[in-house]
Image (cartoon, grey):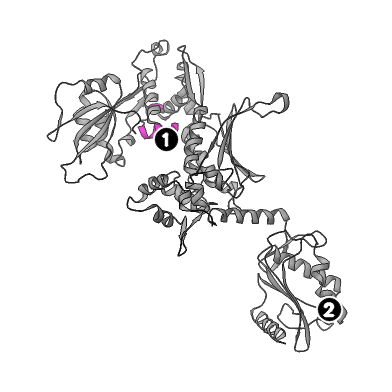
């Protein structure tokens, strides 16, 4: 009796609220108003099955049979034996291999009317189908025919979104690399402990007795990554040719495999990949030269993007990189999220949505990735600025991939300009710089870095030096003079436009220009005042030769009273200039301090 009362109350509430995403009414009658007749039982039963399948394939719901769309309660006019048959609809009209999670199937007697109430939970084990093999899913207030693959994808996507945020009961903080956590913590706040940092980044929660770790914490910081994820890896393959072949013509070799937590994986996989982004060519001056085939920054961005946004819930696959003769393919487990399309990415509007929210946040906080949504746009810009065709993005078969092609495109104006330098047999990166200086346009060091896609400072210097050796690159001002103008260009000396390209003369084209091609040289300068400015260093040391850069690392614990000592690194464009400073017999004073020089450790950045 109590059960009947509760269900009766449920009917009252349902009639008052009406149909919704979670609730539907079915009539026991059919026909015109004033001439209603009982509906066919088989029709009612299959209608019930469709609705229950739709609820189970969505978020669950309840169905009342015997209530009209206008909320009037008309009941079921059928005989008792037929009502019992209707009650068995879930068993008779839903595919036996995909039973719905039925919570309730009850007959309700309401004011002398007979109703039937069904309630189902959200399905988790199956994509539910009717006995005819049809698939439905709840959309707003309707049960809509839906492809079972779509439902399966939505469930897999939901699981993949929740993967990095779920907690691992058996994991403890001793399973994490404490030194790595401290390094990351120092980039955020030097006063925060590892435990507090994990909580600040939402990678852990204190439950009153212990610190509970999310999977994201283990993926990012685990000492032994394979214990928590068997495929947290990047595999790199070399394909000899433009297409993969099988059998006796198999042409794929594995370059290497990088493993470890995400921070280790980013560094180790990049070290594996980077040497294969160049191609050794025989140049016109009878020397073998390494030519960068792709902008390094674009490749690194694509690699980090794959590691950041892959589907970690797929523990059977890792990130794969394939280096073909004409292209570079980077693929990762997990298609694009359903809320993002290929068209969205191609629009380059910065659209984004993170599958791995916690992982992405940490990598963003630590500078491994830039603003979310900027990765694809940045890759496109780098390829475009290097006169290369735009990358191709694919999302299919549970995999996302981006392909960078070794193929160039130029505007008519740029083609005419580059024809002037054709006989010099310039490398791709040299052509990129020359193109920037089309028809006398001034170029900044920052533009060279960004357009060529350079990460390493040494690569930039070698590139500039090679163009100077060909006598086609010159500067309108020295580094010291550029420093004076930096406030006009955002405070960066590298952003000051000071280089220009010269069209080579016939004599230049037909002869090899001899010039010192030794590496740029770095020296250590000690005993400088704490608050010294770069400009002061330039002015004091430029007499020894052209200064390329000044790096002033500040002592974290140093006094800020102006009396503490600090140091810097000064980089000259030639070894001879550095030697001039190192072998100088006269004292160099800066604000009353005698500067001390010595050879710098090249490992120090």
Reading the image, the residue beneath label 1 is 450
Image mark count:
2
- Secondary structure mostly taken by the magenta-highlighted segment of the chain: helix
Residue 526 falls in image quadrant: top left
Q: Position of residue 349 (x, y in %)?
A: 50, 48
Counting residues from the start of the chain, the first of labels 1 and 2 encountered is 2
Q: Which residue is at 15% across, 21% downward? A: 585
In the foreground, 604 or 128: 604
Q: Which residue is at 36% across, 22% downward? A: 465
Residue 23 falls in image quadrant: bottom right
In the foreground, 11 or 198: 198
Reading the image, the residue beneath label 2 is 83
Q: Is residue 387 visible?
A: no
Q: Position of residue 274 (x, y in %)?
A: 49, 30
Q: Quadrant of the C terminus?
A: top left
The tag on residue 495 is: none
Write down the region rendered in magenta.
438-454
Above or below — where is 255 with respect to 166?
Answer: above
């Amino acid at each position: 009796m109590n059960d009947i009362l509760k269900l009766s109350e449920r009917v009252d509430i349902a009639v008052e609220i009406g149909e919704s995403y979670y609730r539907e009414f079915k009539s026991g009658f059919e026909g015109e108003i004033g001439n209603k007749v009982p509906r066919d039982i088989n029709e009612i039963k299959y209608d019930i099955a469709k609705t229950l399948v739709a609820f189970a394939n969505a978020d669950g719901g309840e169905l009342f049979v015997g209530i009209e769309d206008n909320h009037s309660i008309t009941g079921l006019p059928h005989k008792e034996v037929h009502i019992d048959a209707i009650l068995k609809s879930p068993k008779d009209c839903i595919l036996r291999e995909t039973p719905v999670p039925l919570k309730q199937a009850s007959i309700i007697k309401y004011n002398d009317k007979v109703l039937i109430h069904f309630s189902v939970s959200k399905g988790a084990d199956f994509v539910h189908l009717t006995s005819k093999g049809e698939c439905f899913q709840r959309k707003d207030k309707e049960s809509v025919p839906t492809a079972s693959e779509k439902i399966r994808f939505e469930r897999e996507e939901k699981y993949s979104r929740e993967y990095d945020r779920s907690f691992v009961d058996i994991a403890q903080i001793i399973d994490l690399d404490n030194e790595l956590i401290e390094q990351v913590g120092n980039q955020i706040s030097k006063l925060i402990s590892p435990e507090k940092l994990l909580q600040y980044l939402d990678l852990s929660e204190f439950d009153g007795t212990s610190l509970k770790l999310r999977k994201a914490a283990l993926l990012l910081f685990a000492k032994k990554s394979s214990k928590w994820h068997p495929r947290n890896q990047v595999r790199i393959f070399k394909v000899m040719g433009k297409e993969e072949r099988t059998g006796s013509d198999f042409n794929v070799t594995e370059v290497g495999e990088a493993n470890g937590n995400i921070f280790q994986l980013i560094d180790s996989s990049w070290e594996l990949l980077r040497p294969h982004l160049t191609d050794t060519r025989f140049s016109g001056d009878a020397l073998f030269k390494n030519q960068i085939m792709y902008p390094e920054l674009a490749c690194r961005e694509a690699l980090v993007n794959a590691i950041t946004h892959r589907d970690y819930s797929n523990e059977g696959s890792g990130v794969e990189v394939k280096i073909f003769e004409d292209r570079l393919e980077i693929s990762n487990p997990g298609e694009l999220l359903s809320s993002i399309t290929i068209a969205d990415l191609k629009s380059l509007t910065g659209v984004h949505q993170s599958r791995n929210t916690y992982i992405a946040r940490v990598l963003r906080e630590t500078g491994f990735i830039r603003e979310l949504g900027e990765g694809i746009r940045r890759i496109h810009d780098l390829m475009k600025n290097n006169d290369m065709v735009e990358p191709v993005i694919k999302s299919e078969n549970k995999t996302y991939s981006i392909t960078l092609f070794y193929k160039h495109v130029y505007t008519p104006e740029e083609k005419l300009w580059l024809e002037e330098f054709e006989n010099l047999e310039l490398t791709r990166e040299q052509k990129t710089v020359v193109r920037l200086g089309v028809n006398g346009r001034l170029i900044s060091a920052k533009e060279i870095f960004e357009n060529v896609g350079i990460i390493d400072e040494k690569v930039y210097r070698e590139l500039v030096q090679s163009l100077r050796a060909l006598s086609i690159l010159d500067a309108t001002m020295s580094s010291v003079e550029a420093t004076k103008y930096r406030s006009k260009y955002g405070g960066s000396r590298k952003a000051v436009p000071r280089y220009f390209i010269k069209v080579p003369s016939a004599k230049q084209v037909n002869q090899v220009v001899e010039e010192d091609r030794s590496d740029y040289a770095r020296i250590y300068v000690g005993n400088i005042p704490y608050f010294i400015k770069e400009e002061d260093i330039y002015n004091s040391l430029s007499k020894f030769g052209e200064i390329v850069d000044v790096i002033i690392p500040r002592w974290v614990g140093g006094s800020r009273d102006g009396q503490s000592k600090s140091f810097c690194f000064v980089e000259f464009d030639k070894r001879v200039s550095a030697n001039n400073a190192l072998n100088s017999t006269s004292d160099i004073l800066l604000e009353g301090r005698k500067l001390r020089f010595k050879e710098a450790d090249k490992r120090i950045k």
